[in-house]
Image: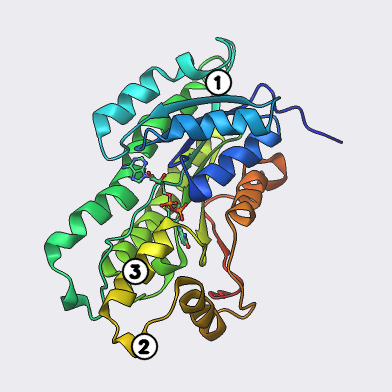
Amino acid sequence: MTTDNSATSILIIGAAQGIGQAIARTFAADHYHVILADLSESVYDTAQQIRVDLPQASVDATVLDATDLRAVEQLAENITELLPDAQQNLQHVVYSAGAGSGKFGFPFWNMHPADWKRVLDVNLMGAVNVAHAFSKVLRANLRDNSTKVVDSTLLFIASIAGQMGSQTDPPYSAAKAGLINFMQVVAKDLAPFGIRANAISPGMIQSSLTRSVWQAWNDQQAEHDKLDYKQWGQDKLNNICPLARWQTPEEIAATALFLASTGAANITGQTINVDGGIIMHS
Ligand SMILES: NC(=O)c1ccc[n+]([C@@H]2O[C@H](COP(=O)([O-])OP(=O)(O)OC[C@H]3O[C@@H](n4cnc5c(N)ncnc54)[C@H](O)[C@@H]3O)[C@@H](O)[C@H]2O)c1
């Protein structure tokens, strides 16, 4: 049985590239109306490329700095302008924006406390801004019938770094730990409205983010210890990942699609690790 998602809209923040872009493509291919938002103006090119690759896709795009609360609130207030018709609601929101410090954070005093602010702002406060502004939009879906369960969702892309004292980039790990904790609060507070909230923790994906982590590491190494990006990642994976393989943006997107589906109707407040088994919790 195929599901008709043509009346369902999803907003993905951090969608110009990487995991956010893969999530947008996957939902567009599954006939959702997708709205891409990103700090980078390249989000418009990404949206156009999805339209070219998937001619049936229904795609909109907008520039957004998620760390700017007023800008996030304005997008939430005007979101109907990006929906295909006035009868439709926004049903799903994904927060995939993220950034590392770009510095080698081991040991932690290698960094300065001033290096933390931007990392906390993008990875944590942006998500807080989005949860505040868009939970209001998702709750308003109930305005006509307060007993109707709408099964809207919020999804936060966290990281396995937030589940361990990862020494690579301390402000990034701390921000993701905060994000996972906040997601659980969001899940509890929105459950009475039929809105679910979850997180996905990717392991290691080839993207600009891990490339900047590698670059910061590589810059610190003596000439004979330097490794190229792929070898650095594979060595790390061989040490810590039972499946010893990189994860892909498409694998994260497949989990995101499941979490938005009715098949996941009883899943809320969870962090799903798509990480080849790096983290195993009972
Ligand atoms: N790549 C990995 O291995 C990995 C692992 C674990 C978690 N993650 C998380 O997955 C998410 C996506 O990472 P990615 O690998 O696709 O990274 P990426 O750098 O390819 O993409 C991140 C996107 O977020 C956007 N962005 C940054 N700041 C923003 C802001 N203030 N407002 C709006 N958009 C903003 C960027 O412009 C970019 O398009 C991030 O939250 C990241 O922390 C990635």
Q: Nearer the viewer, residue 247 or 279?
A: 247
In what quadrant of the picture does the N terminus appear? top right
Left-right relation of 90 to 116 = right
Q: Quadrant of residue 54?
A: top right
Mark 1 is surrounded, within 10 Å at the Cα level, by few (under 14), some (14 to 19) or many (20 or more) other residues, namely many
Cβ of mark 2 under 8 Å from ligand 1: the answer is: no
- Residue in the picture at 69% in, 26% down: 55
* Colour pattern: rainbow
Estimate how packed mark 3 is, as few (under 14), some (14 to 19) or many (20 or more) residues with alpha carbons within 10 Å: some
Residue 42 visible within the image? yes
In the rendered image, which residue does mark 3 sit on? Answer: 215
- Tell whether 88 sits left or right of 95: right
Q: Residues within 10 Å of mark 2 (few under 14, many from 20)?
A: few
Ranked by sequence position, the earlier of labels 3 and 1 is 1
Residue at coordinates 27% horizontally, 40% vertically from top-left? 67
Residue 46: x and y in percent read 51, 35
Residue 242 is left or right of residue 182, and the answer is right
Which dot marks residue 225?
A: 2
In the picture of the structure, the residue carrying the numbered disc 1 is 89
Amino acid type at image mark 3: Gln
Determine if the C-beta at disc 1 is less than 8 A from ligand 1.
no
Residue found at the far right of this picture: 1
Which tag is nearer the camera, tag 2 or tag 1?
Answer: 2
For marks 3 and 2 on the same chain, the one whose residue lies earlier in the sequence: 3
Mark 2 touches mark 1? (CB < 8 Å): no
Question: Do labels 3 and 2 touch, CB within 8 Å?
Answer: no
* Residue 11 in sight here: no
How far apart are the two marked residues, 2 and 1, measured between alpha carbons? Answer: 54 Å
